[in-house]
Image (spheres, grey):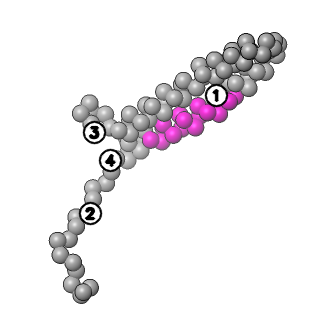
Amino acid sequence: MTATGRSSESRVARWFFTAAVLVFPAALLVYFSWRSSTGLADSYGMGLMYCLIAAVGLAAPLALIGALIWAAGRFGGGSVPAPLPRPSEPPEGNQ
């Protein structure tokens, strides 16, 4: 846990969830930019559908990775296991 009371896993998972949500406005910006730069009339809305399909294709893995990281931090029992103690002397017989 950090000083704020949140583990680093929850912070990283939050970044992945935020990225997954922000993919959709970015896809809409790409669509409107494409439409204004080409001047094409998207009569059937296929350009918008392609952008939304691409957004889902990007957002779903980001959300899944975020969920896995969050679950590992929540149910994993700790982020890093404690190191094994080092022996102060080498074992007998290996000299």
Above or below 58: residue 78: below
Q: Earlier in the sequence, mark 1 or mark 3?
A: 3
Whole-angstrom CA distance, mark 2 to mark 4, is 16 Å
Label 1: how many Cα within 10 Å (few below 14, some 14–19, many 20+) = many
Q: Main secondary structure of the magenta part?
A: helix
Of badges 1 and 4, nearer the viewer stands 1
The answer to whether residue 64 is magenta is yes
Whole-angstrom CA distance, mark 1 to mark 4, is 33 Å
Range drawn in magenta:
53-69
Which residue appears at 17% of the width and 75% of the height? 89
Please state which of residues 37 and 73 is positioned toward the viewer in this rendering.
37
Whole-angstrom CA distance, mark 1 to mark 3, is 33 Å
| Residue 78, numbered circle | 4
In what element is the residue under mark 2?
loop
Residue type of the residue flagged with mark 1: Ala
Q: Are marks 2 and 1 in contact (CB under 8 Å)?
A: no
Q: Position of residue 14 (x, y in %)?
A: 43, 31
Which residue appears at 60% of the width and 22% of the height? 26
Above or below 5: residue 75: below
Residue 1 figure quarter = top left
| Residue 84, numbered circle | 2
Residue 77 in sight here? no
Residue type of the residue flagged with mark 3: Met
Which residue appears at 20% of the width and 71% of the height? 87
| Residue 1, numbered circle | 3
Residue type of the residue flagged with mark 4: Gly
Q: Earlier in the sequence, mark 2 or mark 1?
A: 1
Residue type of the residue flagged with mark 2: Leu
Whole-angstrom CA distance, mark 2 to mark 1, is 45 Å
